[in-house]
């Protein structure tokens, strides 16, 4: 396997999914429900047929990431992987409790913490991720590592080419655009430990799901002073 790996962001409503392309294709996250058409269109734009997607990885089980997983599983036939600690969210199509970790989280909670937007079409995952999951057999040089804190089963994708995709582990400060912790965190201390773990892998370019990025390793070190 020697084809260079590259990351292709798919901008969606309020969030971002990613195509990771090497010899094979891995889709990371799926947006809110109803995002499947935009994702298929992007795949076609870069000459990937839907049935050529080898794996769909969820960074975690929130509706803005796993919302179209069931539809994309059906369209592509690809297996869906999620960390075992977020698997029940996907199985039941529910967001679960949002615990504010930043002031902005407290402001948004009344809008995003309840109602229709907290539910999505459920899916029984094919693969349950533990601490580490290698992507090689799906045609991509890299791995999935657990980076809990935002949710108990949050993961990040670390690619051999120096790119990382970290879901909601990092969400920018809205004024400075600098890296910050997520709006919501199940466990704030775990978030900090996971950011340290990410930094230890020394990725060169860090893709995030919301409001900005990609960041450099220096951006992270400067913002988190670790
Ligand atoms: Zn989230
Ligand atoms: Zn999100």
Image (spheres, rainbow, N blue to C red):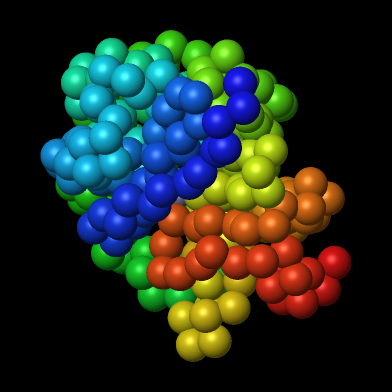
Identified at 29% across, 41% down, the residue is 46
Placement of the C terminus among the 4 image quadrants: bottom right
Please identify the residue farthest to the front as the structure is shown. Answer: 2
Q: Is residue 8 left or right of residue 123?
A: right
What x and y, as percent, mark residue 53? 35, 23
Classify residue 177 as left or right of residue 136: left
Instruction: Out of 148 and 220, give the one closest to the viewer.
Output: 220
Q: Is residue 82 visible?
A: no
Quarter the N terminus occupies: top right
Q: Position of residue 136 (x, y in %)?
A: 61, 20
Question: Residue 144's spot in the image, x, y percent?
Answer: 63, 32
Specify the quadrant of the image occupied by residue 13.
bottom left
Q: Is residue 81 above or below residue 203?
A: above
Residue 157 shows in the view: yes
Which residue lies at the image location 69% right of the left edge and 38% below the top edge? 160
Q: Residue at x 47, y 81 (%)?
A: 174
């Amino acid at each position: 396997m020697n084809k260079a790996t590259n990351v292709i962001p798919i901008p969606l409503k309020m969030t971002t999914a990613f195509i990771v392309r090497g010899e094979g294709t891995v889709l990371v996250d799926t947006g809110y429900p109803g995002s499947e058409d935009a994702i298929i269109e992007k795949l076609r734009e870069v000459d990937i047929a839907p049935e050529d997607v080898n794996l769909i990885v969820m960074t975690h089980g929130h509706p803005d990431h796993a919302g179209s997983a069931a539809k994309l599983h059906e369209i592509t036939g690809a297996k869906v992987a999620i960390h075992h600690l977020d698997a029940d969210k996907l199985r039941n199509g529910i967001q679960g409790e949002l615990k504010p970790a930043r002031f902005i989280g407290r402001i948004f909670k009344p809008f995003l913490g309840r109602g229709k937007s907290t539910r999505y079409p459920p899916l029984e995952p094919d693969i349950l991720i533990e601490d580490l999951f290698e992507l090689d057999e799906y045609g991509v040089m890299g791995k999935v590592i657990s980076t809990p804190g935002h949710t108990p089963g949050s993961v990040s994708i670390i690619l051999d080419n120096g790119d990382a995709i970290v879901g909601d582990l990092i969400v920018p400060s809205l004024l400075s655009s600098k890296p910050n912790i997520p709006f919501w965190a199940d466990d704030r201390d775990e978030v900090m430990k996971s950011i340290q773990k990410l930094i230890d892998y020394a990725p060169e370019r860090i893709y995030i799901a919301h409001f900005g990025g990609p960041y450099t390793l220096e951006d992270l070190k400067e913002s988190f002073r670790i």
